[in-house]
Image (cartoon, grey):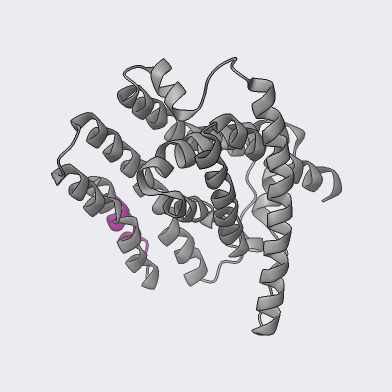
């Protein structure tokens, strides 16, 4: 992790980062946490699993100073260059792998095998799948309601403070620009993000910690509400996972939510 951080710092310094360089202090948080967990008494396998999880968190948090640097040099969401369909799928597949592969490794370590690990995450193939999907679709409706309430509050508060919330979201429009993206990206994001953030991070660090990290994973949008709203959604999904212990419910909700939003942008945007 130290080597990764030093690489990020050297790269940022060479690119002339200003105040955004100091945000790597946030990126570095997983390092002392790993040291603390390593010094504690306990199962060595769980320590290894936690270090793997924190290494992924460090990679995710590296997005924060990068996004801040774009803001620092005056880049707006509308200035972001267009990315091709297959480039978006490739980058999403890479992010999927960054989350999914370590999650499976952690599940295998803690579950004494992949099958046991998947069951501990609440992924039980063939057991009550129809019920889980049904509850997931209900959770999708609840998620939309919560997001609408949160957006309304944000608009009212920002209006009262004399600020205007940006309604444009070029990145979201880009990733919803083709039917192939609308079909593939929700599945890639929903599966990998729920397994890692809710299934792996939440049991270790709690609902609020995983929600904050989940929100910061969306800083590439360069739109504040696209960081705040995912945090709120992560709390809703995290609480649901804590109560039910069934990761398939939140995976269904996440996939369905993204699919509906992207479909609306594709057909109506």
Pick the residue in front: 150 or 41.
Answer: 41
Number of marks: 0
In the image, what residue occupies the spot 71% across and 48% down? 142
Instruction: Judge whether 213 appears above or below 127 on screen.
Output: below
Look at the image and say whether residue 14 sits in the magenta stretch: yes
Instruction: Judge whether 149 appears above or below 74 on screen.
Output: above
Instruction: Judge whether 97 appears above or below 113 on screen.
Output: below
What kind of secondary structure does the magenta stretch mostly adopt?
helix
Can residue 89 be seen?
A: no
Q: Which residues are magenta?
A: 7-17
* Outermost residue to the front: 243
In the image, what residue occupies the spot 60% across and 39% down? 88
Locate residue 24 relative to residue 6 in the image: left or right. Answer: right
Quarter of the image for the N terminus: give it.
top left
In the image, what residue occupies the spot 16% across and 44% down? 40
Residue 233 screen position, x and y as percent? 60, 51
């Amino acid at each position: 992790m130290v080597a990764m951080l030093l690489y990020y710092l050297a790269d940022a310094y060479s690119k002339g980062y200003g105040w955004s360089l100091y945000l790597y202090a946030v990126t570095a948080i997983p390092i002392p946490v790993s040291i603390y967990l390593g010094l504690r008494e306990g199962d060595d396998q769980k320590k290894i699993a936690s270090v793997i999880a924190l290494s992924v968190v460090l990679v995710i948090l590296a997005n924060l100073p990068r996004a801040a640097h774009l803001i620092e040099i005056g880049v707006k969401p509308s200035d972001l260059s267009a990315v091709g369909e297959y480039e978006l799928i490739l980058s999403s597949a890479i992010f999927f792998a960054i989350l999914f592969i370590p999650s499976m490794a952690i599940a295998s370590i803690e579950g004494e095998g992949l099958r046991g690990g998947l069951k501990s995450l609440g992924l039980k193939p063939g057991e009550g799948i129809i019920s889980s999907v049904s509850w997931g679709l209900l959770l999708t409706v609840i998620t939309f309601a919560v997001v609408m309430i949160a957006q309304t509050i944000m608009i009212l508060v920002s209006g009262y403070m004399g600020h205007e919330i940006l309604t444009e979201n070029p990145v979201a429009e880009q990733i919803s620009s083709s039917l192939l993206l609308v079909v593939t990206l929700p599945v890639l994001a929903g599966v990998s993000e729920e397994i890692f953030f809710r299934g792996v991070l939440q049991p270790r660090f709690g609902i609020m910690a995983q929600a904050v990290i989940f929100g910061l994973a969306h800083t590439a949008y360069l739109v504040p509400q696209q960081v705040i709203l995912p945090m709120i959604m992560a709390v809703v999904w995290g609480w649901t996972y804590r109560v039910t212990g069934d990761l398939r419910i939140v995976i269904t909700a996440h996939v369905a939510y993204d699919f509906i939003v992207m479909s609306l942008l594709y057909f109506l945007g």
